Amino acid sequence: MSVALASLQEMARKLRRHSLVSTAEAGSGHPTTCLSCAEIMSVLFFDEMRWDPQDPSGRDADVLVLSKGHAAPILWAALKEAGAIDDDLLSLRQDGSPLEGHPTPNSPWVRVATGSLGQGLSAAAGMALGRKLDRTPARVYALLGDGEAAEGSVWEAAQFASYFKLDNLCALVDVNRLGQSGPTMYQHDLGVYEARFRAFGFEVAVVDGHDVAALRAAFERARACSGKPFAVVARTLKGKGVSFIEDKDGWHGKPLKKGEELERALAELGPAEIELRVTARRYPAADPPTAIASSVRPAYKLGQEVATREAYGTALAALGRLDTRVVALDGDTKNSTFSEKLKAGAPERFVEAFIAEQNMVGVALGLASEGKIPFASTFACFLTRAYDFIRMAAYSQPPHLVLVGSHAGVSIGEDGPSQMALEDLAMMRAILGSTVLYPSDAVSAERLTEEAARTGGIVYIRTSRPKTPVIYAHDERFPVGGSKTPRRSERDVVTVVSAGVTLFEALRAADRLAGEGLAVRVIDLYSVKPLDEATLRRAAAETRAIVTVEDHSVCGGLGEAVAGVLAGTTRVEILGVRECPRSATPTELLRRHGLDADAIVAAVRRVLA
Amino acid sequence: MSVALASLQEMARKLRRHSLVSTAEAGSGHPTTCLSCAEIMSVLFFDEMRWDPQDPSGRDADVLVLSKGHAAPILWAALKEAGAIDDDLLSLRQDGSPLEGHPTPNSPWVRVATGSLGQGLSAAAGMALGRKLDRTPARVYALLGDGEAAEGSVWEAAQFASYFKLDNLCALVDVNRLGQSGPTMYQHDLGVYEARFRAFGFEVAVVDGHDVAALRAAFERARACSGKPFAVVARTLKGKGVSFIEDKDGWHGKPLKKGEELERALAELGPAEIELRVTARRYPAADPPTAIASSVRPAYKLGQEVATREAYGTALAALGRLDTRVVALDGDTKNSTFSEKLKAGAPERFVEAFIAEQNMVGVALGLASEGKIPFASTFACFLTRAYDFIRMAAYSQPPHLVLVGSHAGVSIGEDGPSQMALEDLAMMRAILGSTVLYPSDAVSAERLTEEAARTGGIVYIRTSRPKTPVIYAHDERFPVGGSKTPRRSERDVVTVVSAGVTLFEALRAADRLAGEGLAVRVIDLYSVKPLDEATLRRAAAETRAIVTVEDHSVCGGLGEAVAGVLAGTTRVEILGVRECPRSATPTELLRRHGLDADAIVAAVRRVLA
């Protein structure tokens, strides 16, 4: 019982009218990109998708990811017409309105924030994969612009979707020919997109994107397609339906002026009185997730040498055994990050995302929105590849999303600077609302892995390559926002604050200075964000100065975090990497960059001088 | 007069032997990935490329970018055999040796650092474009692994190369089937790579990568190919030539053990006594670049309202008029960043790189290595997309590479968080050796644009969307590492340090407090890195506290930079963004996030309380 084509066409017209009016009222926004996809949105929301306008939560309903996020006004218009929201469309872009300039989860209908182009297909692929894992037949759609198809991440997502046979995923490309500042690379050469999607493993339909019958037929083909994702490549016109903006350059991101200009456009579009009721159509409910019962049980001897990256793998495998929501993602480094330990016990929840870190993070975000607890791990330096995705993931407010970066710092040794993460703490701290954890020994690594699974939003765990001795008892707890003080006395004159491999240099320095009668406090700042401000302030009050040490750039990491909190209360001397490292042994590099026990001893003497 | 095929084959064997021996001696490294590309390297260096082993500098010679940087040992071996270097191959990965674990410019033969996969083709495309601009016929080769073809950036580079008809570029894909932790996505299905490179506009040859005759024939086709870049997709075996590692999983990044294991492998390979002399073959020299004579001449009235992004565009156009080395790159935001101003005057040096920021930065790096002064601009938030490329660009030590990010911070207003850069200062400060500039008015924006062109390495300029009043005279100078003090008196009780749009909030706050009899010093910290430590220390000594204000995350930005320097000398109160912003007007958002004059007044009162 499908909707009449004429009704869908009229609804497209109505959505166009809403888009023009709301952006004109806001005085900003992107009406022309809304107009190019009006038929696509009309057919999707009022005919194709099986969804329930009363319930944005369901994993048992089809979902759209609006990758071309600047078309937000038409998304709000479609939701409003479908009865899914009752917000005033004229509140678009106003302070406090959920109808933001680009989609964010401030609207319950938005699962992932978009607006940085080229990211939606990865998130959609993650959702589609999550539904496959849950054996839920509900489908996932992603609407892309042609301009954003220039982003390599789109092709990472495409290859991922075909590799994992995500036939519940449908990509829609709104080829409207015009970018922000001029024509797109291929304008209306739709064959380019067709050839590329085919080369990346998709079944493809090329259609006139303003022809509702053609769109409906393409969606039917997509539904029937098995074993492959589907792409609908749609030829459209930006500004379609209004003569003075249609297919015209120079109108990106420009609203019409209220009054004569807007009225002229609305007159050209013609009236649209149609009301379409969306019948709630849902799939059988997904199985509810099993309750979290996870609890790691570290089993090490004190002094045993274990790399934190390996302890992470052990904890991840334990969590995965106990909680089926845990999914691990890898960028072809699983034997180095030790995420392969989960693969051994739960291969169906181990996702080899290959060397494509942007897509790995995007897929993790999509999985998170399906109720999974994704752990995406690779070398910490390669997470820099995904920084824009991480930033957008934060704005997507996922319930859980854990990123784990191994091989942090110069202490990786001979591989050289390309493999050393020296910016990851700065990068992850700057993400609003993030949690940044940096374990030093195997017990804390296991405990923090579990903490990460229990913490909301973006959590980053930094692990190290070298083996380090176990210094904490099995039952020690490591709450987010806490710290440990492995060296402490009433006579402490200086406090050394560190985490990770350099904590052991700090302990060595403290022991050496103790031999000379100088008591040094050592704080293990395993929670780099949030910081244990109380303990730091106490140390600042009780000792004469603070020395921080980190295997990371001196800018934006642990040292500046401490300085930012303590500034004014005590002297803070920051030890970190200041110059480009090169290949050498870990020991040589810690010495060269002033991060070893000798350097710490010297710094302590300096601040006491 | 080509080299005998048997000689090339024997040289391949010799390069294999070197790769096994040097990594065994180092006790780390990636021998098997060297063995898969031995014939490719032999044919390239000893037959195909026209180069001069005595001179690594020339733009008039063919060049190879080793995108699969972990194959560095065979690069060193080829250079050594060609007489281009005299370093001991057994010094591989040792402290101080230029023969690092992955290629870096510590060897004069390396123009761009590699080792983060998927980046080499962009740099190579930049070099190829630079040679087209210089009308130099010398060619550029990029050797990729199959694993790294999963990186979307490879496809950004491919589409760029075909869009710009870079027929002087040849991509080589060493399809050795095995990644680090298991088989690659497509193993030996070479048709996938063939179809994708064709879909992305390349002419393609599929060959047996261990057949020197086939390789030579493919290179001949590549040379003859006009109007398109060329890709040689080569079927190879990882560990080729040594039975117990050939095509075997589990041998990535593992050297053979010195002694019996190594000897057995060398015996299997057989002896290789060949000596091949590379005859220096060069192209006609490129025109020497014109001498820099650039000097911007800001022409504004005091108080005139001009956005720093627009002043940047004006200065860029002026520099481009005066110095033909200046090239602008854009990510389809030229009408927002105002880089389009250069396009108007020098369209041949304006590169529309479309919405593919990773490739934009990689191309800029390649252009830099050809003697250009590239300015790559887009919204600052989208530079997060290219963070891994920026990191690797820093390790490449370019003479000049300027990145310009516009639309920084919440002050962009209604577009919402996806378009707001709130992490860029942290991201760029953490890059070792970087320079970070943040102008507030049009005069400083123009002057800093010129400073950037004169500064070595990675320079970042942060520009703002809103118009701000001109506060500096035309002849004012803004040296890197300096600052300005637009409000200062003998009676200053507090110093407010800021830059960009919030500087004007600071000035307003100071004026308001002055009206109440409280003198507040205001420092314009336009050089966020390096910092003007002397001026900050003086302010710390002369006033009772420091308040910093920035339209950026509180983590890793201007405030922590100041706190890191001043910690212990005075109280530092950091105002910055702490919570996820949403759509609203710039004024509303500066207020909401505590960055406006009211918030600064309150902070000043707080630190005095």
Image (tube, coloured by chain):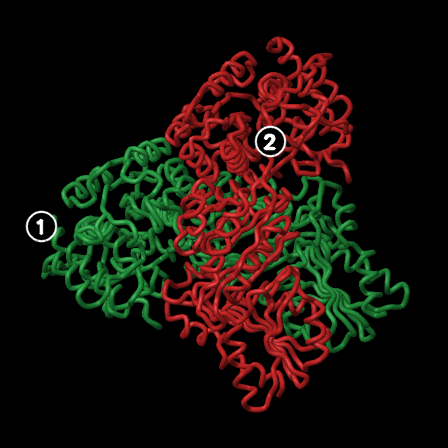
Chain colours: A red, B green
Give the crowd class for mark 2: few <14, some 14-19, many >=20 residues within 10 Å: many
Is there any visible trace of residue A433 in the rendered image? yes
Which residue is labeled 2 in the image? Answer: A59
Tell me the crowding category of disc 1: few under 14, some 14 to 19, or many 20 or more residues within 10 angstroms, Cα based. few
**Residue B86 x/y as whole percent:** 23, 69
- The percent position of residue A49, horizontal first and vertical second, equals 59, 21
Q: Is residue B39 left or right of residue A116?
A: left
The Cα atoms of the two marked residues, 1 and 2, are separated by 63 Å
> Total of numbered circles in the picture?
2
Q: Quadrant of residue B530?
A: bottom right
- Kindly identify which chain the residue marked by label 1 belongs to: B
Identity of the amino acid at label 1? Ala
Q: Give the vertical position of B284 relative to A299 (above or below).
A: above
**Viewer-side label of 1, 2:** 2
x, y (%) of residue B160? 41, 39
**Quadrant where the image shows the N terminus of chain A:** top right
Q: Position of residue A164 (x, y in %)?
A: 42, 34
Secondary structure beneath dot 1 equals helix
Instruction: Report whether mark 1 lies on the same chain as mark 2.
Output: no
Q: Which residue occupies the extreme bottom position in the image?
A: A516
- Which residue shows up at 83% across the image and 66% down it? B606
Mark number, residue B6: 1
